[in-house]
Image: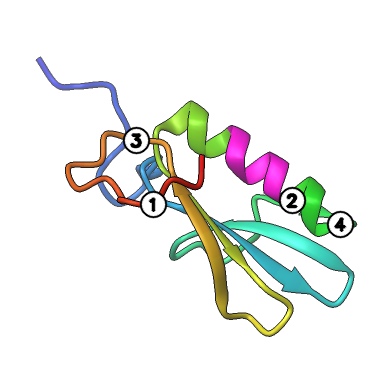
Amino acid sequence: MRSRGLSPRRRVEHDEAGHVVPRDDGWAVKSEGAGRSASIHPTQAEAIAAATASAKRKGTEAVIHGRDGRIRDSDSYGNDPNPPKDKKH
């Protein structure tokens, strides 16, 4: 019997990190490799909250970028085989 799932070309990957990135009109949460933003927020704090909630739900990573586009911080919420040694949380 043939599976009723989506074909591999159309399947949406749910294990990709969510990046909080600056926009002209605020901040966006984008998945790696996505052409469009998953959500747009007026403040970075709101975008971080959305990315963190999504990462916790999906068991992935939230990557926070600064105004200059450089990675400022990241948090992993999945099963990390090499957890960081920092004591941030």
Q: Indicate the position of residue 28 as horizontal and vertical percent values.
A: 72, 60
Q: Which residues are magenta?
A: 48-53
- Which residue is more in the foreground, 41 or 14? 41
> Which residue matches tag 1?
86
Foreground pick, 75 / 47: 75
User: Marks 2 and 3, how far apart in space?
Assistant: 20 Å
Residue at mark 2 to residue at mark 1: CA–CA distance: 24 Å
Q: Is the residue under label 2 in contact with that under label 4 (CB below 8 Å)?
A: yes
Q: Position of residue 24 (x, y in %)?
A: 85, 77
- According to the picture, the residue beneath numbered tag 3 turns out to be 78
Q: Amino acid at mark 3?
A: Gly
Q: Amino acid at mark 4?
A: Thr
Crowd rating for badge 1 (residues with CA inside 10 Å; few <14, some 14–19, many 20+): few
Mark earlier in primary sequence (3, 1): 3
Q: Earlier in the sequence, mark 4 or mark 1?
A: 4
At 54% from the left and 62% from the top, the residue drawn is 73
Of the image marks 2 and 1, the number of the one nearer the N terminus: 2
Which of label 2 and label 1 is nearer to you? 1
Q: CB of mark 3 within 8 Å of CB of mark 1?
A: no
Residue 69 appears left or right of 4: right
69 in the magenta segment: no
Query: How many marks are shown on the rendered structure?
Result: 4
Q: CA distance from mark 4 to mark 2?
A: 6 Å
* Residue topped by disc 4: 43
Amino acid on which disc 1 is placed: Asp
Disc 3 to disc 1, how far (Cα)? 16 Å
CB under 8 Å between discs 2 and 1? no
The tag earlier along the polypeptide, 2 or 3, is 2
Q: Amino acid at mark 2?
A: Ala
